[in-house]
Amino acid sequence: MRLILLGPPGSGKGTQAKLIVDNNAIPHLSTGDMLRQAVAAKTETGKKAQAVMNAGKLVSDDIVNAIVSDRIDMSDCSNGFILDGYPRTLKQADALGAMLEGKGLSLNCVVALRVDDDALVERVSGRFTCSKCGEGYHDKYKLPQVPGKCDRCGSKIFTRRVDDNEETMRTRLQAYYKETAPLIGFYYAKGLLRGVDGMGDIAEVAEGVQRVLEEAVR
C-alpha cells in the first residue's frame, strides 16, 4: 500500500500516520526524518543537502526528490509506505509521479484530512505539555485534574510551543492553502483522493482512514 497523507498543520497527520503504520506494517516517511537520515548516513544526496543547509539555504526540490527516491528504494518500503509532508507542491507531485513510474510503482490513494480552520486554530493554540513526561493538555479540552499538576508524573512545570498561537497558526494555514492545498484537486482529477473527516477524536478519525485504505486496495 502506497499512500500520501494530506492535511493542514495541526490536523493530526502525524498521529494518524503512526496508527496507519501499526495497522498496516508500512513505514511512515516524513520529509524531515528522511532529510536527517540522509545527512546522518552521509549518502551522496545527504552530503549535498548538508552543504546547502550549512550555507543557510533551503534544500532544493531536486535534492528533496532524490532523498525520497533513495528512501523508497529501501527494503522496508517493499510493501508500501506513507508519505507525510511530501509532495508539498504541484511541482513535487509531478516529480513523484515520474519517480514512481520509473520504478514501476504507483500510488494506491491520497488521504486528505478535512478540518474546520477556526476549530483547528483553537485546537492548536490551546495546547501545552508537561515539561517532564510530555503528557499533552489543552486549555479547553483537557486540563490537569489537579490545576497546575501533571496527571501522569505530578510535575508542576508545563511548556507551550512558541508557534502554538493563533497568529502563527493562521500564517501556517495560509501557506498550506497556497502551496499544498492545490494537491487536493490534482489527485482528485487522478481518481486517487479519499477525504476523511479529521475533526472527530483520534479513534474516530483512525477508523475513517482505515476504511478508505481498505477500499482503495480492493
Image (tube, rainbow, N blue to C red):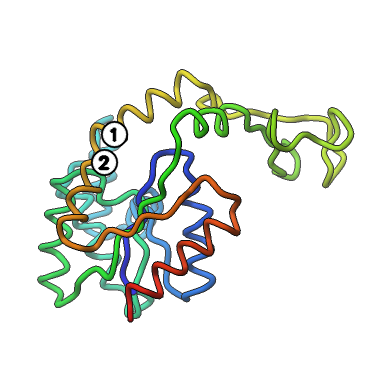
The answer to whether residue 40 shows anywhere in this view is: no
Q: CA distance from mark 2 to mark 1?
A: 6 Å
Which residue type carries mark 1?
Tyr
Relative to 196, is 147 above or below? above
Q: Nearer the viewer, residue 50 or 106?
A: 106
Relative to 49, is 179 above or below? above
Query: The C terminus is located in which quarter?
Result: bottom left
**The residue tagged with tag 2: helix, strand or loop?**
loop
Q: Residue at x 37, y 63 (%)?
A: 82
Question: Residue 28 lies in what quarter of the image?
Answer: bottom left
Task: Find disc 1 in the rendering and name its residue.
Answer: 177
Which mark identifies residue 9? Answer: none
Q: In this rendering, would 20 be left or right of 4? A: right
Q: Residue at x 82, y 38 (%)?
A: 150
Q: Nearer the viewer, residue 145 or 50?
A: 145
Local packing at callout 2 (Cα closer than 10 Å; few below 14, some 14-19, many 20+) is many
Q: Residue at x 32, y 65 (%)?
A: 3
Q: In this rendering, would 113 be left or right of 56? A: right
Q: Spot the residue most to the top.
A: 167
Q: Residue 166 placed where, x, y %?
A: 50, 21
Relative to 106, is 192 above or below? above
Local packing at callout 1 (Cα closer than 10 Å; few below 14, some 14-19, many 20+) is few
Task: Find disc 2 in the rendering and name its residue.
Answer: 180
Relative to 25, is 50 above or below? above
Query: The N terminus is located in which quarter?
Result: bottom left
Q: Residue at x 48, y 48 (%)?
A: 198
